[in-house]
Amino acid sequence: MKTISIIIIVKNGEEYIEKALKSSIWADDIIILDSGSTDNTLSIAQKYTKNIHVSEDWPGFGIQRQNAQKLSKSDWIFMLDADEEISASLQNSIQEAINDEPQIYQVNRLSKAFGHEVKHSGWFPDWISRLYPNNLTTYNDALVHEALIIPKNYKPSKISGILYHETYKTMTDYYQKMSLYIDAWSTQNINKKNGGILIGTLRGYWAFIKMYFIKLGFLDGATGLTLSILRYQTTVMKYVDLKIKKNLKKTN
């Protein structure tokens, strides 16, 4: 029988992580790589696994996932976020898949925002590569929007079952997460993209139109409208932040 590690990178995830851990207890190993939690994340995790590591030096999402994977000795890896939950049907599919030929597998993620499941808006279906052989590949180095590196001659296969995802419960939750995302995105793109209020506004309008109309966000009701407006706002803010960082770089 092949073995599998479920890996969770986390910081201050006490509000969500217990669901993630409960849905992972069937795995051979649960690995936690914490980046300096100041809440009850670690005490919750200790109820489910002893394989807990802390590193307050934050290198970005991609490298942090690489570092976490290096802690595993299992044949297979499933990369799980602290705000996600593996459904029973997905668990069964994973357990079947790891005893087949080595392959990269995608799972379908269903996200919830502000208490409502989002089934349109470009959020669902949401196929993401999360299950893969430990010795086959790893994640890229991106600070944000990291992705699994797909080797040549490999085309990810899809497995059944849902990966549940709790995104934002409140506006405070949203803005806290987005402030970190905007900072990482602008830092990552400081030498790659142009910033400023004009380009941010134009891209923001397009982001709203795409999400609400083209991706059928209006079918998600008030939640779809809220997410589309927030997408516009976040897009503007990240390009403004990029411009600010470029200006600061010139003056230093």
Image (spheres, grey):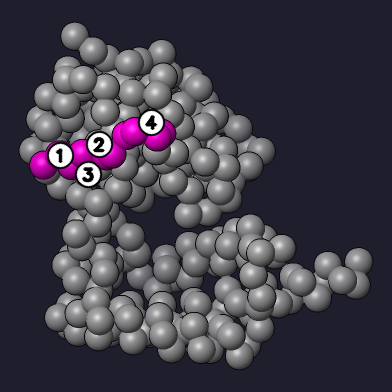
Amino acid type at mark 2: Tyr
* Left or right side of 191 for 42: left
Disc 4 to disc 2, C-alpha distance: 16 Å
Which mark identifies residue 105?
2
What is the number of the mark on residue 7?
4
| Within-10-Å neighbours for mark 3: few <14, some 14–19, many 20+ | many
Tell which circle, 4 or 2, labels the residue nearer the N-terminal end.
4
Q: Main secondary structure of the magenta part?
A: loop
Position of residue 235 measured from the top left corner of the image (x, y, whole percent): 50, 77
Q: Check if residue 248 falls in the magenta segment.
A: no
User: Are the residues tagged 1 and 2 within 8 Å (C-beta)?
Assistant: yes
- Return the disc, 3 or 4, that comes first in the chain's sequence: 4
Residue behind mark 3 = 107
Magenta stretch in the rendered image: 151-160
Residue 176 in picture, x, y percent from top left: 50, 65
Q: Residue 218: where, in percent of width, then height?
A: 19, 84
Residue picked out by circle 1:
159
Local SS, label 4: strand
Under mark 1, the amino acid is Ile
Q: Can residue 225 be seen in the rendering of this structure? A: yes
Residue, x 47% and y 54% (percent of image)?
145
Mark 1 and mark 3 lie on one chain; the one further toward the N terminus is 3
- Does residue 157 show up magenta in the picture? yes
